[in-house]
Amino acid sequence: MALKMTNREVDGVSVVALEGRIVLGEESNALRERIKSLLAADQKKIVLNMDNVTYIDSAGLGTLVAAHTSAKSQKAGLKLSNLGSKFQEVLQVTKLLTVFDVYDSEAAAIGSFSK
């Protein structure tokens, strides 16, 4: 199943709701392009809502790390919200939980930008 991405703007924060699998190939490329275009449009606050992500592989993780790095280099913030327990575990095992700003809810992630 392809990765579906839905963009919304909430309080000046770009929210990208992801649905499906983030895997090597089309899916991770599409996500990379989406982040790139948001940064190019000068979006400095981005939240990735992972609520409906069913699976992520190492390439998908690599894409998230690359997106995080790109955002940082452009003085933008990239935050993750609504990680499932499986995905949270993967980030814990890979020590990536220390890299990303992770929030339980989309609202918490959005609110964190105004602090």
Image (tube, rainbow, N blue to C red):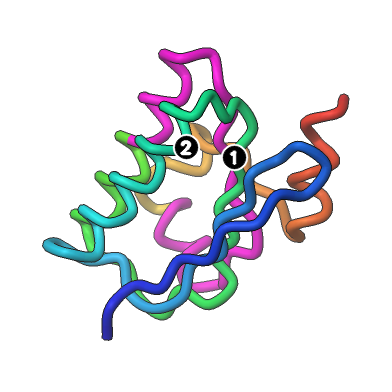
Mark 2 or 1, closer to the camera: 2
* Residue drawn at x 45%, y 66% as measured from the top left: 5
Check the image and report above or below for 10 versus 51: above
The x, y position of residue 13, in whole percent, is 71, 40
Q: Which region shows up in magenta?
A: 67-92
> Which residue is the site of mark 1?
46
* Horizontal relation, residue 4 to residue 45: left or right: left
Q: Are marks 2 and 1 in contact (CB under 8 Å)?
A: yes
Identify which residue is drawn at 19% across, 54% down: 59
Residue 79 position by quadrant: top right
Q: How many marks?
A: 2
**Residue 78 placement (x, y as % from top left):** 55, 35
**Which badge, 2 or 1, comes first in the chain's sequence?**
2
Q: Quadrant of the C terminus?
A: top right
- 8 or 64: nearer the eye? 8
- The amino acid marked with disc number 2 is Leu
Q: Which residue is mark 2?
A: 38
